[in-house]
Image (cartoon, rainbow, N blue to C red):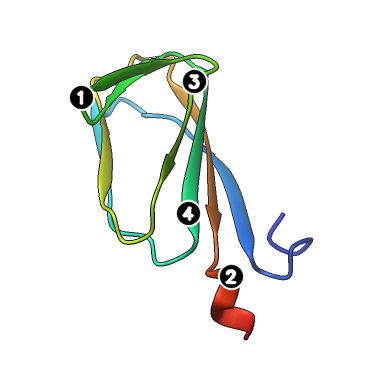
Amino acid sequence: MFAATGGRCEVRTIRPAGAHKIEFGPHDGELVFGFVLDGTATLGGNRVGAKDSFVVPPGEPWALREMSGDFLLLHVTTARLDAAA
């Protein structure tokens, strides 16, 4: 995806690998998009599960807590749209 978008988008999957909490620093791109493929976790004060999606605005740190052992997240980040300008 990175090459196909000229470096404007990155896509990866995230598994907890035994962790119960993952913290993410602020992202300076346009947005962070998450889609829960499997399992459950807590994002902020909300429980998320399979087929749930969310976005995180630029500059906001965020964390996933209480992740189930089967948790799998599709994690997409985009670059700033004005970066090419």
Q: Is residue 54 visible?
A: yes
Q: Nearer the viewer, mark 3 or mark 2?
A: 2
Mark 1 or mark 3: which comes first in sequence? Answer: 1
Mark 1 lies on residue = 45
Mark 2 or mark 4: which comes first in sequence? Answer: 4
Residue located at (75% from left, 64% from top): 3
Amino acid type shown at disc 1: Gly
The picture places residue 72, in percent across and down from the top left corner, at 49, 25
- Pointer 1 with pointer 3, Cβ within 8 A: no
- Along the horizontal axis of the image, is 29 left or right of 7? left
Residue located at (47% from left, 54% from top): 31
Amino acid type shown at disc 2: Leu
Amino acid type shown at disc 3: Asp
Q: Which mark is residue 31?
A: 4
Per the model, the C-alpha gap separating discs 2 and 4 is 10 Å
Q: In the image as oriented, which residue stretches furthest toward the right?
A: 4
Q: Residues within 10 Å of mark 1 (few under 14, many from 20)?
A: few
The picture places residue 17, in percent across and down from the top left corner, at 37, 29
Mark 3 or mark 4: which comes first in sequence? Answer: 4
Q: Which mark is residue 81?
A: 2
Above or below residue 43? Residue 4 is below
Per the model, the C-alpha gap separating discs 1 and 3 is 14 Å
Mark 2 or mark 1: which comes first in sequence? Answer: 1
